[in-house]
Amino acid sequence: MAKKTAELKIEDALWSAADQLRGSMDASQYRNVVLGLIFLKYVSDSFNEKYESLIQSDYPEDAEDRDMYTAENIFWLPKEARWDVIAASAKTPEIGETIDKAMTAIERENNQIKGVLPKNYASPDLDKVRLGGVIDLISNIQVGDEESRKNDVLGRVYEYFLSNFAAQEGKNGGEFYTPRSIVRTLVEMLEPYKGRIYDPAAGSGGMFVQSEEFVREHQGVISDLSVYGQEANPTTWKLAKMNLAIRGIDNDFGPHQGDTFTNDLHKGKRFDYVLANPPFNLKEWGADKLQEDSRWSYGVPPKGNANYAWIEHMISKLAPDGKAGFVLANGALSTSAKEEYAIRKAILEDDKIDAIVALPGQMFYSIGIPVSLWFVDMNKASSGERKHNGETLFIDARELGHMADRTHKEFTREDIDKIADTYHAYRGTNDQNYLDVAGFSKSATIAEIRENDYVLTPGRYVGLAEQEDDGESYEEKMSRLTSELSDQFKKSAELEEQIRVALKEIGYEI
């Protein structure tokens, strides 16, 4: 327990120091500046550890051999980019220029992050005394040596910062960060062990980071998973590239940011998995230019809302046996707008919707509207799973979760297991027998969905939870309740009389 407290102090101390840098900077700029420093410290720690081992070897000259580092997936750092140079400049007015030069040098030597790292530390918006203080603090924390990597210090700090930025930025925070417990639920349900995985609205890359964690936890090989993504916001695209680079996750995010609808950077590619949290209810999405697009195989999405355009885009990207899990606003479950209703009906009749999970409210930093998880399966008769053609699983998880803070709810590990285990039992991919649970889950046939006019709201199918028998007979319960009600009526009458008397005393008789 003491260890956990100590770990949290690292995160709190870093956040507290970094928060002083905000000044007049734009939120997304500031976010990248802070995370850029953590990136720099991480690659420096990894480099220094290897450097020291080579200096002490029989061939110390190898310490300046670039290939000795790249062979082990360690970023090669030229001398001006090493942390000792930056730390030595912490108290000087030139600290901003020193960091900018380091970032430029790292990009020059490491192609996978070219054009990605922030280089605005010399900006007058950044207080150089406070910047030096943050450098001093970071200098005392190891995030990239072997021990820190084993304990995922970097992952924890990055996650803590991303969630804090999302909370601070409110609505805009949801554009780059999907809460961890939601991503974890998607990943545990889809189980992306190997193959090609794609996120068309990648944000800061959280879907891929947790997919990597899932693979490692299950003793898989991360190189069996190929990562593809796209992100429209240029600063968020850079953040995702940094986030994946420090974890050694190879990725294809295209050569730059790009709008997925109007500039698909992965045209013609098919994927084994799609994981996504696209922006909800997007009004301006380029519909006018895309009326004849080949992705709309189930119908042309409406111009004023991109929800169904995202659904059709993701389905179009799946391989013949591919699977998708994504987040959408609840309005998409039951919209009766002409185009959306027709598309939803066509997708259901084509037997592509595998499961819908209704989430509790307050799970996002950015929005208050209720959302659901959608799961698509291009082949419900795949080998290794139960043949479940013509069925869709509905899960109502609105009663799960706990308040992690005053405004934000999270799933516990047990909540995620309950949802994922139910889904795997339904698909026949675990050792449990699936049974409908009133108020929680229901495997519905396409005939039942037709009867409900293709509405996909889980509450319509799962029904009400069975009430537990408390052992009190009906007569006893009614006698007790009426007695309690009688007492409350008496108290109400007494209060009413007291109010009458009080009003009469000041000249207002009722």
Image (spheres, grey):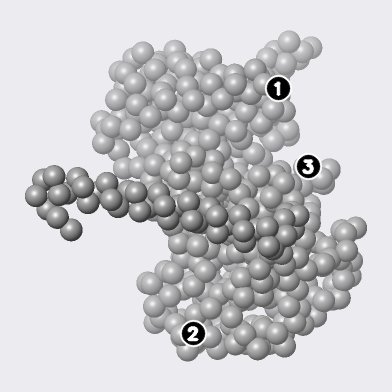
- The residue lying at 41 percent from left, 23 percent from top is 17
Q: Which residue is mark 2?
A: 336
Q: Which residue is mark 1?
A: 147
Q: Which residue is mark 3?
A: 217
In front: mark 3 or mark 2? 2
Q: Nearer the viewer, residue 115 or 189?
A: 189
In which image quadrant can residue 29 be found?
top left
State whether residue 169 is above or below residue 271: above
Rate crowding at label 3 as few (under 14), some (14 to 19) or many (20 or more) other CA atoms within 10 Å. Answer: few
**From the viewer's perspective, is 300 left or right of 429?**
left
**From the viewer's perspective, is 47 left or right of 351?**
left
In front: mark 3 or mark 1? 3
Which secondary structure, mark 1? helix
Which label number is shown at residue 138? none
Which secondary structure, mark 2? loop
Rate crowding at label 2 as few (under 14), some (14 to 19) or many (20 or more) other CA atoms within 10 Å. Answer: some
- The residue lying at 49 percent from left, 72 percent from top is 331
Residue 297 can be seen in this image: no
* Residue kind at label 1, given as amino acid type: Glu
**Rendering coords of residue 1 (x, y %):** 67, 21
